[in-house]
Image (tube, rainbow, N blue to C red):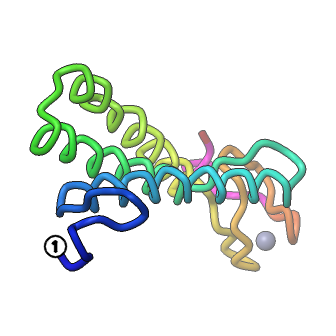
């Protein structure tokens, strides 16, 4: 390894330790981002990047568990996390696609809107629901 004695900060390093610590960094970053977004909006907010960081962190952690630790408890704890992460991204994508752009002023209106929030014109019927 590239550190004297293979240790830095008292930790013995190898490639899988780096993968494990990258997982920790992804998870820590997602909490900081989510907390900051919530503080800025003064309401609970979960930014989309939170789910992407969750996927990255859990994949790194699962790799670490499978290929380095080979611990069934650790593997099981991280084997299925991706399901709600992916599901949240799918729901988010559908929600974004359900927004309706006004033909008159191009304002993007929330799903289910009957009238444009900007100019008040009726929105296409097919775009509702
Ligand atoms: Zn409009």
Q: Mark 1 points at which residue?
A: 1
Question: Cβ(mark 1) to ligand 1 < 8 Å?
Answer: no
- What residue lies at 62% left-to-right and 49% top-to-bottom? 125
Q: Where is residue 86 in the image (x, y as percent from the top left)?
A: 37, 42
Q: Position of residue 49 (x, y in %)?
A: 52, 59
Element assignment for label 1: loop
Q: Position of residue 120 (x, y in %)?
A: 87, 63
Vertical comparison of 102 with 128: above or below: below
Ligand 1 falls in which quarter?
bottom right
Any magenta on residue 125? yes
- What residue lies at 73% left-to-right and 51% top-to-bottom? 35
Quadrant of residue 11 in the image? bottom left
- What residue lies at 12% left-to-right and 32% top-to-bottom? 70
| Image: magenta residue range | 122-128
Q: Position of residue 32 (x, y in %)?
A: 66, 56
Vertical comparison of 111 with 108: above or below: above
Vertical comparison of 10 with 2: above or below: above
Any magenta on residue 44? no
- What residue lies at 24% left-to-right and 20% top-to-bottom? 73
39 left or right of 24 in image = right
Most foreground residue, 109 or 13: 13
């Amino acid at each position: 390894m590239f550190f004297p004695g293979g240790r830095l900060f008292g930790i013995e390093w190898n490639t899988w330790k780096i993968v494990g610590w990258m997982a920790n960094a992804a998870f820590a970053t997602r909490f900081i981002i989510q907390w900051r977004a919530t503080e800025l909006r003064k309401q609970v907010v979960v930014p989309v990047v939170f789910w992407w960081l969750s996927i990255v962190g859990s994949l790194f952690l699962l790799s670490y568990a499978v290929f380095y630790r080979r611990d069934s408890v650790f593997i099981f704890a991280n084997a299925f996390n991706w399901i709600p992460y992916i599901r949240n991204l799918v729901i988010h994508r559908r929600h974004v696609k359900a927004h309706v752009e006004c033909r008159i002023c191009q304002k993007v209106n929330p799903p289910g809107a009957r009238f444009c929030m900007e100019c008040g014109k009726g929105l296409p019927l097919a775009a509702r629901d």
